[in-house]
Each structure stands twice: as structure tokens, then as C-alpha cells.
Amino acid sequence: MIDPVILQQGSDWRAQAEVFDEIFFVFLALGTLVGTIVVAYTLWNVYKYRDDGNRSDEEFDAPVVGELPTGQGGPKAKKLFLSFGLSAIVVISLVVYSYGLLLYVEDGPDTGDEGDIEIMVEGYQYGWEYEYPNGHTERGELIVPADQRIDINVTSRDVWHNFGSSDLRIKTDAIPGDYNENWFSVSSEDVAAQGGEATYPVECFELCGPGHSAMEGQITVIPEDEWEEWYDNTGNGSESASIEASGLGAVTQSGVSA
């Protein structure tokens, strides 16, 4: 029921921040339009009903304190209830539209039959560890496929951290004993534009100790078929599979959480 309300552009959103951009600009545009109409109508009434000294007191229908200016069912009543009706339509439309987009923020884009990929992200002083659904772990580098929704479940093993990538516009608190969910997606067009392998820097956005500035990592996005080949070569507790084996990059070592 809510899906048709969401703009078709939704398939191009890569992260939650881009959905909030959409909400912000819709409210900004509509607010600017409504504000312009209200101010213009107010100024027009100020000019139309200005005191030019030619209007007699008998012709002036002054409002009464505590009563709606209905004009006994005349033109004033029509204007009043028309403004109420239009305001209700605008507000209800915004509520339904925003609610639909907020559901999209929580659930992410529809992955259809392919499903999504859930990855556990654990911060520690001073690095990141990623655990895939099959139990395989990576440190420093998160390797994901293009054209897939990547669900990340972020936590910390020691102090507060904040996992984020400015280029992908994702940012999530990493709190010991707590788990925060987020998602992102990278299109195959973006991967092709970077020569078949897209890389995005990862940083910690929460001051976490003397090594905070060196707490960096990388998200590597590769074509889906190449990622599946790489993923098939990984296993529970095993060392990181070499991307180089697929002709995609250098070897990355990983270990299991201590």
C-alpha cells in the first residue's frame, strides 16, 4: 500500500542518507511553494484592504474576537474552509509520503529472489573486523558484490567507535554490547566506472583513543560473479581468500576475533 507512494528514484538510492536527502528536498520545495503562496496572498490582502480613506465604517465587516470569520456563510466562509481543506491534504500527503520513505529506510531496497548479504562489523582498537554469513572473517577490508543490498550489523568489542564511509554516505555507531543496523548498495555502473573494482575508504568517526586517526579500512566492491567466486573459496575460521587469485587485487590476511 505504501510502496506506490515512494518515488521511482528509490532504486538508485545507495544508502539511508540519500533517502533523507529526498525527504529534505521534498519538504524544502513544498515549504517554499506554500510559503510563497501564503506571503503573496497576505501581501495582496494588505494592498487590497488598505485604508485609503474612501471606505465607510458601515462597509467594513470587522472580525469578532472568539468567532471564526465565516461571514455568515458568504465568501469568507468558502475561503476559510478551502484553506483548511488544502492544508489538510498537504499535511496528510506529507505524512503518508514520509512514512513510506521511513519504512524504506528501515527495510532497505527490495532484493527480490536474490536476497541480501548480512555482515557483522566489529570495531576494536584500532581496526575493523568483518564476519560473513559463512563465518569467514576479514580484517581491514570489507569485500562485497555490486548490485546487492549489503546489511551491516555494527558493534564493538572494547570502546565506542563509529563505522562510516563518507563516499558511501554510511555512518553507524559501534557500541560494546549493542548492535546497530545499516545498509548500503553500490551499482555495477559505479564499479565499472572505477575500472571493475570500486574502493571506498572506511574511517572511525568517534574519538576512541590515541590510535583513533589510524583506525582506517576499505570497502571493496567487485562484480557479483567475481565476488561469488571469491566467497566460495572462503570458509569458517579460514584465512582470507586472495582477491588476487581471481585477478582482482592483493592478498588480505584475516583472523578470528580474540
Image (cartoon, rainbow, N blue to C red):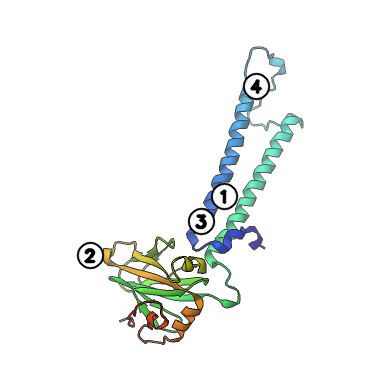
Tag 1's secondary structure? helix
Q: Position of residue 189 (x, y in %)?
A: 51, 66
Res. 178 visible in picture: no
Mark sitting on residue 210:
2
Residue 162: where, in percent of width, then height?
36, 64
Residue 26 is marked as 1
Q: Residue at x 39, y 80 (%)?
A: 243
Mark 4 lies on residue: 49
- N-terminal-most mark, 2 or 4: 4
* Amino acid identity at mark 2: Pro
Q: Residue at x 48, y 68 (%)?
A: 192
Dot 2 and dot 1 residues touching (CB under 8 Å): no
Q: What whole-number distance in Å separates the C-alpha atoms at marks 4 and 3?
A: 43 Å
- Crowd around label 4: few <14 · some 14–19 · many ≥20 (10 Å): few
Amino acid type, mark 3: Phe
Question: Label 1 vs label 4: CA separation?
Answer: 34 Å
Residue type at the position of mark 1: Val
Which residue appears at 44% of the width and 66% of the height? 194
Q: CA gap, disc 2 to disc 1?
A: 42 Å
Vertical placement of residue 45 versus 239, above or below? above
